[in-house]
Image (spheres, coloured by chain):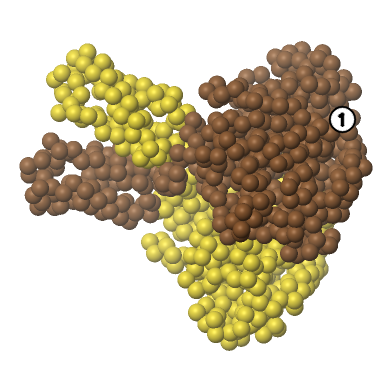
Chain colours: A yellow, B brown
Amino acid sequence: MKKSKTKSDLRIIPLGGLGEVGRNMMLLEHKRKILIIDMGLAFPEEDMLGVDYFIPDTSYLEKKEKDILGVIITHGHYDHLGAIPYLIKKLGNPRIFASELTQAIILRRQGEFPDVPKLKTTQVKNGSSISLGPFKIEFFRQNHNIPDNLGLFIKSPVGNIVHTSDFKFDSHPVYDPPTDFNKLRTIGQKGVLLLMSDSTRAEKKGHSLSEKQIMGNLEEVFKKTSGRIIAATFSSLINRIHQIITLSKKYQRKVAIEGYSMKTNVKIARRLGYLKFTKGILIETKKVKDYPDSKITILCTGSQGEEEAALVRITNKDHKIIKIKKGDTVILSSSAIPGNEKVIQNLKDNILRQGAKIFHYQMMDIHAGGHAKQEELKQMIKIMRPRFFIPIHGQYSMLLEHARLAKSTGVPEKNVIVAENGQIIKVTPNKISVSGKEVPSSYVMVDGLGVGDVREIVLRDRKILSKDGMFVIIVAINHQTGKVKGSPDIMSRGFVYLRESKGLLAQTRKKVVEIVNKTAGAQRPINMVHLRNSIRNKIGKFLFTKTQRRPMVLPVIIKV
Amino acid sequence: MKKSKTKSDLRIIPLGGLGEVGRNMMLLEHKRKILIIDMGLAFPEEDMLGVDYFIPDTSYLEKKEKDILGVIITHGHYDHLGAIPYLIKKLGNPRIFASELTQAIILRRQGEFPDVPKLKTTQVKNGSSISLGPFKIEFFRQNHNIPDNLGLFIKSPVGNIVHTSDFKFDSHPVYDPPTDFNKLRTIGQKGVLLLMSDSTRAEKKGHSLSEKQIMGNLEEVFKKTSGRIIAATFSSLINRIHQIITLSKKYQRKVAIEGYSMKTNVKIARRLGYLKFTKGILIETKKVKDYPDSKITILCTGSQGEEEAALVRITNKDHKIIKIKKGDTVILSSSAIPGNEKVIQNLKDNILRQGAKIFHYQMMDIHAGGHAKQEELKQMIKIMRPRFFIPIHGQYSMLLEHARLAKSTGVPEKNVIVAENGQIIKVTPNKISVSGKEVPSSYVMVDGLGVGDVREIVLRDRKILSKDGMFVIIVAINHQTGKVKGSPDIMSRGFVYLRESKGLLAQTRKKVVEIVNKTAGAQRPINMVHLRNSIRNKIGKFLFTKTQRRPMVLPVIIKV
């Protein structure tokens, strides 16, 4: 009896996005049938050297391919869809459900991965619904900073579930319809057993800015600027891009777009009607010089100081056509992603040094995050009046704060679950609880073509190499006498400036000869493992004494 | 004539601290005689892999040892004194002038460098003055977040100069006397030709918080906390440390101090009377368990998430005695240094996961920076009414903003100089200008015992190694036939997970044999440079095709 009862619980299993920002992926499982919501990537933490992204660990889904009902992607941001190319094949290429714009972004990205199978995508939209196994999913519009973002109203065997997607409330958005509170209230009135809501800005007091306010502030900049405007933002911030193009039009400026991802996103969004402008407003970058400065906007990527992005290349004078000049006005319309602050500060300084003006979000409200702040979050909870509440999407401190907000609106403490990736949350009509068991939820690292092959040991080695470099010692020994033949060779990188370290290298060579002759000269047969360890340890210590650095010492012994 | 006139200008030469935060060092030169103000270090930028600090480039001072009049250290922070052990010997061990506490901190640090000569320090204080060559320097008290901080009023042959040191105005400091506006006004009334003022917070509107407000807020936390209090701050924030110890006493808590630098700073400051408390309040950490939780404060380093600091070890369960437990309250009383935000977020999450509460500066004003904000900066300029103004100490954007503030108070645009490290600013009684020439002002990197030996090429290698690791190929060739002997050896670290890459390694070995046999097999004599390059390029490309990674490929060819 107990077993079958457990099986008819609904199980909610977050594989990513809880306790972190990014890499969102969640499973809803009922009687073995699994619905997947989102499949995102996250950008590497500081200690993930050389890693491109990390994605969810899907080992729990191995051999369950036939039980996967489908994948719903809530909106077109990479932290919700970026892992598809790496995971979809492994999961048996299940169907993907997404809105028009989201679908287009998924398919565009898939084009960069020629080896993966053709995706099976199905378009859904605000008001439409689909049935997948025991779940019926109705989609409803949510404001965010990309259009065509969908929240989910899921009828499940245990009760109704609301998944907010990323969202903010905006009564005066630009180009997007305003939040449909009537619709939300209708959903709330149907009775919500469980609400799962976006926690990204749960630690921020108040209400997020309306896009209308942003537009007004951006217009102020356009109004008083007579030189070129260089506006940098995320390529995924379709709304902000829309505002900048519209203002450029109003102030008779042509727009040159720089940055591959920005160009392709603009193309897609325009084709689908999410960006509305006449094509004549766009010009090629090489035509910029044909217009007076007052008639030019350069719209580009790089607001986070990303090494290869357009604004950074322009600022570093690495861009073929555009250089910063006196009289330029640079708009940085995105807030700093935590950890990027110093890089952005240096970018700003370099722009200012070249005589341009800067407007950024700390000086003026020219950027609004796409996520609800505390007042909106409480409003969402009050509208939905859920029995159970799980804060999703955010660092642990954000989830905790969101949980506190839920309790403050009256959700009983025992009905609020602060869960983390890999935990199994069991939901019945009367009870929510965290199972003692967990599913794997490790960091799966993507580095080039390798998915998951960068393990702890690889990262540990990269860390050692990054700090003090490496020191390879090649020594030939006579296999009969165990004595060194010739002089040992040393190959070192990232350790010391070799040209000025000849003395150190000579001493080290001498030391190697001593170690080998003493160690191997006395052994019959020569214990190569012991000899190698001996060189590694003794030379490691020697170099540390001389330099206080610990390069990776790698002895190569060749018997001749 | 022209030459001698130039020589009697006063030359101001910043070697560090302008266009960056940290590494403060400035020269005042008149008729070859040089006064040095501060000698600080800075913490490495993101791309300075493995570097401990960076310090000013003093090549300009080479062979000018006998012209150095002395070094004034304004206060006891490492960004003002940390480079002394690395530079003082090179500069001929000139005399150092500092306040009592600053002197003690300089000497304590010097103790960690046994190989440098004994310092020649002279104690100065508020109201005292010294004459050094053409300069007469009067010291005046300035509030900051460390006691015994001195501003400089310098009588020079061209006119009076004020150097503010780092400062903020505080009418209600805790333990420090309040800002002496009368004294400042007296200085202003003497006539100030040039003001050089701290720009660190020039981009922040308003007035900095008084330490009294901080104290009140901290007391709120103490009042309502019944578990242990774990308070983390910088070891150099003597004022904050004082507040926490005093509050602990008031609320009958014993204080255990964790972190070497915190312990030694507390010891010094107490010995000199800058920290006032009865010794009985301190306990050893191993005694913590002998008291109820409500009677314990743990005062520690690690508020920035520094890898080896006490709070981080406690949080990661690496600390021998203290572990975070439910009921603990952690106070993070320092703002995030730009770039550390993500690490601090992860630290917070890990503390919260273990059931502790957190108070940090974003939630409550329990930390005030030590630097004046815009209103204070303007007030300082108004008091000094300088003819010329140079913003010092800060990133370029801060200097620029400070310059704008100066202009807003009435300093004419042509009299405000936004200078950067290495520039030479010439001052006469009637004119301030930047010379066309510059002195060297590069980053001198300190890595272990090496000062300046980590060059661009070493950093570039570390960067490559940190991203994709390295790949050493050892191949023996017959020196007569040029053919490979045996199978090539491969040693790789930080590139791929070797256990799962046997196929790739086998293919690479085969490829190496092909390359060598084809290249060297046809050459007489064998061109070793060409052969090595050929292996490096071809194997590099091969590995990139297979993995999209670019490890550093290092071929070792052994002729047998």
- Which residue is rendered at x = 46% and y = 55% of the image? A86
Residue B97, quarter of the rendered image? top right
| Place of residue A177 in the rendered image (x, y in percent of width and height, measured from the top left) | 74, 74
Which residue is painted at 79% across and 34% down in the image? B129
Taking the spot 10% from the left edge, 51% from the top edge, the residue there is: B523
Image spot of residue A482 (x, y percent): 19, 20
> Left or right: B519 with respect to A32?
left
Task: State left or right for residue B162 relative to residue A84.
Answer: right
Q: Which residue is nearer to you in this view: A45 or A192?
A: A45
Name the secondary structure under disc 1: loop
Assess disc 1: are there few (<14), some (14-19) or many (≥20) residues with their C-alpha within 10 Å of its C-alpha: some
Camera sees residue B148: yes
Is B388 above or below relative to B200? below
The answer to whether residue A367 is visible is no
* Residue situated in front as seen by the camera: A480 or A262: A480
Q: Chain of mark 1?
A: B
Amino acid type at circle 1 is Tyr
Q: Which residue is mark 1?
A: B175
